[in-house]
Image: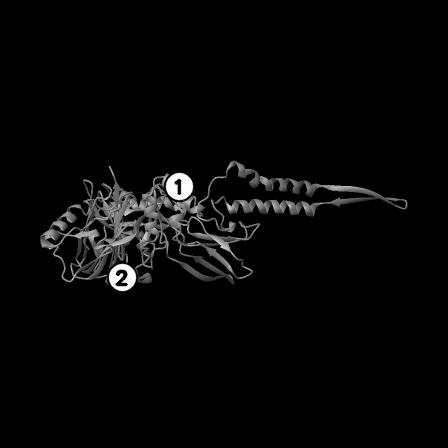
Amino acid sequence: MSHEPVTSGGSRAPRGASIRRKGAGRALSSVTGRRALVVALSVIVGHGVVAGAAQFVPVAAAVHVHTTFSTGSEDLDAVVRRARAAGLRAVLFTENYALRFEYGLAPLAGILRWRETFPSLAPGGLPAYLEAVRRGRERHPDMILVPGVEVIPFYYWTGSLLDGNLTMHDGQKNLLVFGLERAEDLQALPIVGNGRPLRAGQWPLRLSPLALAVAGVWLFGLRRVRYTRWREFRIRRETHYRWAGAALLASALLLALDGVLAGNPYWRPGGGPQGYAPHQATIDSVVERGGAAVWSMPEARDFGVYRRAGATVTTRTDPYPDALAATRGYTAFGALYADTTAVEAPGGLWDHLLLEFQAGRRGGWPVAIGETAFHATGEAGKRLEDVQTVFLAAAPTPAAVLEALRAGRAYAHIRVPEFALVLEGFAVNGTGLAGTVRAEGGAPAHIALAVAASDGKAHPAEARLIRNGAVLAERKGPTPLALDLEDRETPRAGPWYYRLDVRGERGTRLLTNPIFVAVGG
């Protein structure tokens, strides 16, 4: 599949296409006529992948991919070969890291515990994984390979085994981590699978069993002698405390062993819900180390009921789109994937967060990506190439792809085996995705866009141009779709942005990140 811009010579307006304008008709001045459309598409071709003076390379990528290093069914080389055959240029791996769940019974939760471990990277296995990706780059120089991990910052338990309602919550409320290629950085993340050194204030509590042990030894050797008289006899009575001493000594040993087995995790699942504090701590740790944190599939849900040793255990993760508003500093979120999504709908949560950013109430804006969530071909009907993120990278390198991810120079799309919707151009006053246009308050903005099908055929589609969360204009008709217009009712005060949402037949979809417009110099 090609994502290269088309030439203006092949961009004739499709027959039967129609345009619907939202709001007053005078708000948009549509350029008509064959000559004007050719000129418009020339602008698109020249600026659709340009922001400023830099030329960007479109890199079609599968994001969120597992191999046999964790829960995938194919090894790294097999996945890369599959990606190449599907026309992809990059794979962003997300191996599960420290994927295990525990349930402990107080007060000896370290000893009396059940543990379920799934295929995943252990802390000690990180160097081998990172080295395998580096060697994979050498074997496949035409492909861009980015190592990443999928982590669980926190989960917690409610209910009890005795009542048959034991439930584990948020075991799939996950983050994807990219850009950290040192094992020690990943081992230091404050997630449930990682431990941490004891702080000075924790040592007295951890050493407290020694006091019980000393008391137990003292009691074990203690004896009390009493004398009594019975008639002419003097009777000597001894009282020993061996049982009490043995009990204290055994308790001390159990508590010490429990402390060793429990380790020193960042978060304890038995402590109940912690809100988004663990997730924010993980995001902050990733960012401090120079990485990128991505909220994974925030509107997906997970539910299961399992039998373990005669006990019933329920796992439950409810959709968590509120995480996007409740946390700060993350880079991106899964906006399109093989599930129903609503966050990216016009006027939805994503637009709310973009407007917050424009108003200065958020330090950064959340980038929308497409998530493959690939484990095995055919699993849940998935193929590696079904959901893609196309990065506009400064060069075909892992570092450039990560830079494009952070900058938001990307669009996501869902395809079918026969074709995909392809963004051939999207620009505002000549500035492309994630760029910022400078304009005077009330000055009209010129928007040019073009969408085609990867097979070059005509497929019905509907393109919606969204400004500050509201649909500004719609274009319906067969591909290729083109729209060239002037927005004459731009906000006179404050910044604004445009983004594009295109829906085609059979569930095909294309979603861009925004182009921002700032008022004044």
Which residue is at the front of the view, 153 or 136?
153
Question: Where, by quadrant of the figure, is residue 224 drawn?
Answer: top right
| 71 left or right of 399 in image | right
| 149 left or right of 394 in image | right
The residue sitting at 38% across, 41% down in the picture is: 185
**Which residue type does callout 1 highlight?**
Ser
How far from the left and from the top, in percent, is residue 134? 29, 44
Q: Earlier in the sequence, mark 2 or mark 1?
A: 1
**Which residue type does callout 2 highlight?**
Gly
| 326 left or right of 335 in image | right
The residue sitting at 53% across, 37% down in the picture is: 201
Any part of residue 121 in sight? no
What residue is shown with label 2?
Answer: 507
The residue sitting at 31% across, 44% down in the picture is: 358
How far from the left and from the top, in percent, is residue 146? 29, 46
Q: Residues within 10 Å of mark 2 (few under 14, many from 20)?
A: few
How far from the left and from the top, in percent, is residue 493? 28, 43
Q: Secondary structure at mark 2?
A: helix
Any part of residue 314 in sight? yes
Task: Determine contact: label 2, label 1, CB under 8 Å.
Answer: no
Q: Quadrant of the N terminus?
A: bottom left
Q: Quadrant of the C terminus?
A: top left
What residue is shown with label 1?
Answer: 285
Q: Residues within 10 Å of mark 1 (few under 14, many from 20)?
A: some
The residue sitting at 52% across, 57% down in the picture is: 159
Q: Nearer the viewer, mark 2 or mark 1?
A: 2
